[in-house]
Structures are given as C-alpha cells and as structure tokens.
Amino acid sequence: MLPTRTPSYPREYRNKMPKLKKIIDQSKLRKRKRQQARKNRRFGRVGIAQGLTIEPEPFYEKAQAEKIITGDNNNFIILGQDRPGHKFTGFGAKGATQSSKIDLIAGMGATFRHKDGTYGPPNEETIINPSFAMDAARVYISQKSDLDRYMSLASVDGQAPPGRSGIGLKADVIRIHARQDIKIVTGRARVQGVGRKGERLSTGGENDVVGTISLIAGNYTDGKESPTMNVLEPLKMFSKAKNKLQPIPKGDNLAECLEDMIDAMSQIASLVGQNSGLIQLMNTALTTHIHIVPTPIPLPTSPPPVYSQGFAPVISVQAAAAKTSKVLLSSNLSLMRNNHLNKLGSNYINSKYVFTT
C-alpha cells in the first residue's frame, strides 16, 4: 500500500512551493481533436485506470541517422548519434564516429514558450528538438559527449574534458533508493585481465585520474567575498574571498584534530590551575611577610596595610575562582569529548551511514 503521509517542508520553502497545475491540459490540441476530447468526456472520464488520453504531441525533427520509438503521450526513445538539442549540436553534428546515443524523454518540450507568452506542452503543429531546459524528464546516454555544457552545469576543478562517454539525468525531482546501500565511486574498476594500467576510458585512453565528486546545490560554484571580523580587533572589518564549492572534511581526521585541540586546551587549563596556585602561594607569602628593621631597637614590621587589606583579599578570591573555573573547564572538555567524539555520544560528529573519501 502506498504511503499517504503529507510531506513536511521547512517554513522558508512553504511560500515558494509552486502550485500544481491542473492534471488535464488539452488547450494546445487542434480544434478537431479538442472537440473530440470534449465529446469523450461527456460520455465518461477518459484515461482512468491507464486508459488512452488525448493530448498534444509535438512533431519531432528526426535526423537521418536516428531510429525513434514513440508512445501516445509525448514520450520518446531515440537511437542515434550524440545530439543534445537540434541536429547541429553534439558530436553527431560533426560527423564523429563512436558517438552513439540513447535518448529517453518523457514530456518533450514540456515548458515550450508559446507566442502568447505562456509555457506548456507544444501543440501538434510545432516542430521541436530535444532540450535539457524544456523536456520534463530525460535520461541521456552517449558514447561521446560534453554533458556539463549540454546541461549548463557549473564548472568545477578537475572535471573530465569533453569527448567522454556520459549519462545525464534531468527532471524536476530525482530519487535514488537502495534497499541496502549506495556507492558513488570514481576511478578505475578493480578488475583483473585488462592490462597493467587497468581499466581504460571509453576512448581507449589510460584512466590514471581518480576524479572528483561534487555536490552542488543551486548550480553555482563561483567564489564570493564576504565581510570578516577579527575577534582580536572587533572594530577592524575586512573582506575575504571564499570558494563556494569547498572540500568536505573527513570525519575521522576531524575528530582526531578536535581531540588534539581538546588535549591542548586541557593542558592550558592545567597550566592556568598551576599558575593560580602559585599566585595564591605568593599572595600568602606577601600577606604574612615581616622583616626586622635596623633601628636602635630592632622591631619586626607588619605587612603593608595597602597590600594585606586591599590587594590580598581580591587576589585570594580571584585565585580561588580561577581554580574553580579550571575544574569546570576540565569537566566541560571531558563532556565535549564524550558527547561529540565518542561513537556512543549523543551528538557524535560522524555519520553512521554516510562516508566519503
């Protein structure tokens, strides 16, 4: 049984969620078919339980080298050469060999712009080409391609050059669900019997690059300057350029770094405690200090009243407070280690299920 729970979205997204369009749109049908559709609806609901529907289907501009399998609902399987858009795009337009492609499209030209300024499926008189920007959902498989350019994706350092085989997926939403685990892997496969250099690229070239994995939200990777404040000089502001796309920290390495920082802070807390103890001893010595004044009748002096009655009590209180703070700091550092760096901690910083190299 399918779940019926209504999904919950963060508050900031709720007002931005687009309203669903009506599920039946036959406005772009030619007049004769539109009349037929109205007549069919008069005698019952059309399309219920996967029945046939009448909807506008564009005319696909077929290339000579292509074979096409079509359905009755603006869906296509196109076999041919690399062609992301019209016939003069892709490696197929250059006459390249080894550039075969399989193009699966559901809803070609779904956001086609009409003469009246509206967007929607094209009518039957429209000659149309594939488009990653307009097609509703698409799976593009090519032997030789330039997918980042075809799909207008943000560039990243270390990305593969054009002319490699590729698979491009695009839709409003994409879900990948494994019943056990998912791996996203780059680099050569660990196979035997393919030569000393291992698995090769689809072009036949050596594959000696590990490759990168980039997770990009918003299709934007350009750097950005942001105002920064120095905590030691709060009135001094300066701008610092930061990369939008940044490397992900490794959990174990980060935990090791934080462990070292906590150890260093514990050592500092210990030194502060020792220093407070020494100050307390010095304060006691000065408060009780007397010496013999060489007078006709040698007499011992009393501690200076300014120190014994003024500074000494304050120093005693502050030294005692420092010792207490040292104990609290040590306790907090221990609690931090147990909560964040212990696998059984309530806020362990590493994920149990997501791993990265």
Image: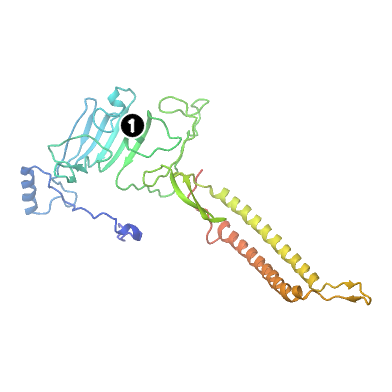
Q: Nearer the viewer, residue 70 or 113?
A: 113
Residue 8 falls in image quadrant: bottom left
Residue at image location 8% in from the left, 46% down from the top: 34
Q: On the rendered structure, is 164 left or right of 241?
A: left
Residue at image location 79% in from the left, 70% down from the top: 286
Q: On the rendered structure, is 236 left or right of 62?
A: right
Residue 10 falls in image quadrant: bottom left
Q: How is the image coloured?
A: rainbow
Which image quarter holds the N terminus? Answer: bottom left
Q: Horizontal and vertical percent for residue 57? A: 16, 40
Q: Horizontal and vertical percent for residue 292? A: 89, 73
* In the rendered image, the vertical position of residue 68 relative to residue 133, given as above or below: above
Q: Nearer the viewer, residue 91 or 6?
A: 91
Query: Residue beneath label 1, please?
Result: 142
Q: Horizontal and vertical percent for residue 14? A: 31, 59
* In the rendered image, the vertical position of residue 144 relative to residue 277, given as above or below: above
Helix, strand or loop for disc 1: strand
As drawn, the residue found furthest toward the front would be 296
* In the rendered image, the vertical position of residue 74 relative to residue 316, given as above or below: above
Q: Nearer the viewer, residue 280 or 125?
A: 280
* In the rendered image, the vertical position of residue 41 relative to residue 111, given as above or below: below
Q: The disc labelled 1 sits on which kind of residue? A: Ser
Is the residue marked by circle 1 packed among few (<14), some (14-19), or many (20+) residues within 10 Å? many
Residue at image location 29% in from the left, 22% down from the top: 95
For the question of whether residue 231 can be seen, the reply is: no
Q: On the rendered structure, is 130 left or right of 348?
A: left
